[in-house]
Amino acid sequence: MASTTWAFFKGQQVPLEEANVRVDTHALHYGTAAFEGVRGNWNEEHGKVYIFRLREHYERLIRGCKILRMDIPYSVDDLCQITVDLLERNGFAEDVYIRPLAYKSEEAVANLKLHTLASDFTLMILPFGAYIEAEGAIKCQTSSWRRPDDSMMPTGVKITGLYTTSILAKTEAVMAGFDEAILLNHDGSVSEGSGENLFMINNGEIHTPFETANALLGITRDSVMTLAKKELGIDIVQRRINRSELYLADEVFLTGTAAHLTPVGRIDNRDIGDGSTGPLTQQLQDIYFECVTGKNPDYMDWCTGVTPGGG
Ligand code: PMP
């Protein structure tokens, strides 16, 4: 591994330790930023890191920028190129996590007006293994924290301030001995995990909360819906899901860039199915992993291959 980790900051590649903001930076005080979490998956045989659906991540980032009135001087194409260049420079020959951040960079704290504040873009890339440490099917807790409603804070994009709720929920769950939290909407319907979308399987049908259930519009969610349709002929149904339906489901799984496709074996101390990874979840997980690691030729347009060190 290269000795210096490089970041992209104020328009250029700099060593990560030099990519610093001042303490009066607006985003630090008010959560006025939008971020992305992107994975690069190492394929040993090809000698490449495959970045999964890079363009779609930047399209979502730009949607977050629009909502927060952040003008950053880069197009989606520019952002993809900046990312590929930085990954090459870092030379990682392993799985990586890519963290773009568009933020209100103005050094001004007593100001609550988005439209008068300058914005900037920064990017870092770090080696990254498993996000959820537990092996196999995980244990979830229904959180005492509710997913904010889109009328309170935009929920379909990754605005940093919104993550306070996810972090409260995840902390509560892990401190109580669970692996992950499931958040309900204010009306009691199921929304999503603290950093993942949720799917439920019953009698071979797969259901997930509506796009309007305040969940993030996940790129892994979209990928799994496409794979279920194309590879298994299953149309995933979007609908309102009640908490107790989860307890009675045959299978439940979570999807997210960091968590990949994670089976859920227990919710609120009740086994889901027999408590282990269900057969349809396993099948989808296998298909998904082939795609994200650049091993399925039919889905190479989802992968951006990067050779460590360039070339
Ligand atoms: N919900 C939340 C709250 C998230 O943070 C994430 C991770 N980005 C997801 C769902 C899954 O989204 P994606 O598949 O795009 O990573």
Image (spheres, helix red, strand yellow):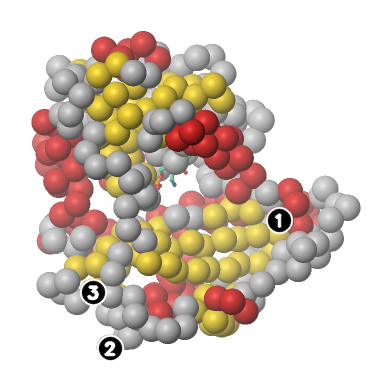
Please tell me which residue is depicted at 21% across the width and 60% down the height of the picture.
Answer: 293
* Towards the viewer: 243 or 32: 243
The spot of residue 30 in percent (x, y) is 73, 48
Please tell me which residue is depicted at 27% across the width and 63% down the height of the picture.
Answer: 41
Q: Which mark is residue 61?
A: none
32 w.r.t. 241: above or below: below
Q: Which residue is mark 1?
A: 27
Disc 3 residue crowd, few under 14, some 14–19, many 20+, Cα 10 Å:
many
Please tell me which residue is depicted at 32% across the width and 58% down the height of the picture.
Answer: 129
Secondary structure category for the residue under label 2: loop
Q: Which residue is mark 2?
A: 311
Residue projecting furthest to the bottom: 311
* Towards the viewer: 80 or 103: 103
Secondary structure category for the residue under label 3: strand
Please tell me which residue is depicted at 44% across the width and 22% down the height of the picture.
Answer: 142
Quadrant of the frame with the N terminus: bottom left
Name the quarter showing ligand 1. top left
Q: Earlier in the sequence, mark 1 or mark 2?
A: 1
Q: Which mark is residue 48?
A: 3
Q: CA distance from mark 3 to mark 1?
A: 35 Å
Disc 1 residue crowd, few under 14, some 14–19, many 20+, Cα 10 Å:
many
* Towards the viewer: 280 or 17: 17
Q: Earlier in the sequence, mark 3 or mark 1?
A: 1
Please identify the quarter of the rendering in which residue 273 is found.
top left
Amino acid on which the number 3 mark rests in the picture: Lys
On screen, residue 41 versus residue 295, left or right, reads right
Amino acid on which the number 2 mark rests in the picture: Gly
